[in-house]
Image (cartoon, rainbow, N blue to C red):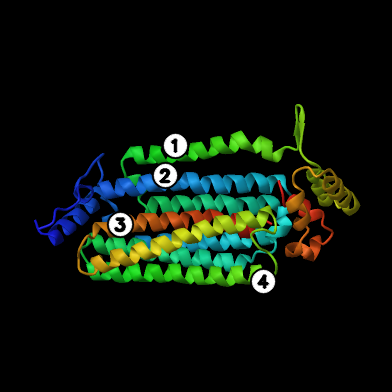
Amino acid sequence: MSEQHAGQHAGHHAGHEAGAHAAHGDSHYVKVYFTLLALLTVSIIGPMIGIKTVTLITAFGIAIVKAYLVAKNFMHINLTPRFVVYLVTTTLVFMLLFFAGTAPDVMKSSGTNWEKPAWIAAEKAFAAGDIAGASLGARIQESHGEGHSEGHNEGHNEGHSEGHAEGSSEGSSHE
Amino acid sequence: MSARPIATTRSAAGMPTPRLAVWWLIASEIVIFGGILGSYIMHRLAHGIWADYAANTNPWIGAFNTFVLLTSSLSAVLAHQAAERGEGKRAANLLYLTTLGGVVFLCVKAFEWTTEISHGMTITSNTFWSFYYTAAGIHAAHVIAGGIIMLIVAQTAKKNLELHRVEIIGIYWHFVDLVWIFLFPLLYIAK
């Protein structure tokens, strides 16, 4: 068999295995594309309303729908052998395990016999609008040098001077 | 006559080996991007102030790039369809179009990053910007890799050779698009 032939054969073989998508025709994919564009528009307009729930649904809910449409219609995951779906699902489950295992440490500032450095308190104070408290927290950390000092000092930096000039923001920059 | 590699002719596990390989690749990529996005989400939820940092990103630029990637995904899947019909030349042209989408995406990204860096928002500014540049940077690296591979595939496809590769690179490209679908709301919308 010539190489060209072999290539074509392999192409056809792959095509027939994937099966139904060949029968869809180009118009099917164009329809899916316009659906994706419509969803993109909604995901942009939704957050403009300013309601948190609407933002979550339109931004992240729609992202999941778009991802499903791409995986199903463009990647044809539904036409692959079942074990591919299991494979992908397994990696997603690993991702969730990673999240569940590390999120408590990242997202909580204290627990049994442990407490996060002062910069977290500084950040909370800043978030609550207590600029003085935030600056104080940052200064406490600097004076105690809790292992974050190097970045911390720079952290008050240039990048975010607008709106966060007080340096309270810097604290948040270093975990 | 040179022998063809087994990987391109064998159909293991009920599907052609190249397609199996690309799905394995995608599975490993999910862990990479999943780790980055998962870390970003937990830090974003833990640090309310990140909303203020995120306010500096331009949602219109992000939206435009989403539009570009979705459009390039359409041309990639249409290239696959053309390859299925044995129309190698059309498949190659559609792959070139897809690569052009990748180039536009990267140009917009370069403009965006230049603006942000010139305003002092660099990868060392704080953890938010570290995540921002790392996530978007790794994604951009995938766009570059996909574009290069697509050009190589298009070269053979236009001669009506190795048409099965059109589907394989297409699956990879859709995955790159899919990652951006999640990066867009995380980095540009949630403020």
- Horizontal side of B44 relative to A72 (left or right) equals right
Give the image quarter of residue A140.
top right
The residue sitting at the top extreme is A112
Q: Name the residue tied to disc 1.
A: A90
| Chain under disc 2 | B
The tag earlier along the polypeptide, 2 or 4, is: 2
Q: Name the residue tied to disc 4.
A: B118
Seen in the picture, residue B2 relative to A96 is either above or below; the reply is below
Where residue B75 appears, as percent x and y from the top left, is: 37, 66
Q: Secondary structure at mark 2?
A: helix
Marks 1 and 2 close (CB-CB < 8 Å):
yes
Q: CA separation, marks 2 and 4?
A: 37 Å
- Horizontal side of B13 relative to B61 (left or right) equals left
Residue in view at x 61 percent, y 71 percent? B114
Where residue B24 appears, as percent x and y from the top left, is: 37, 44
Q: Name the residue tied to disc 3.
A: B167
Q: CA separation, marks 4 and 3?
A: 40 Å
Marks 3 and 2 close (CB-CB < 8 Å):
no
Q: Tell me the kind of residue under disc 3.
A: Glu
Residue in view at x 64 percent, y 44 percent? B42
Q: CA separation, marks 1 and 2?
A: 9 Å
Counting the numbered discs, the total is 4
Q: Secondary structure at mark 4?
A: helix
Where residue B52 appears, as percent x and y from the top left, is: 73, 58
Q: Name the residue tied to disc 2.
A: B27
Q: Tell me the kind of residue under disc 4.
A: Ser
Q: Tell me the kind of residue under disc 1.
A: Thr
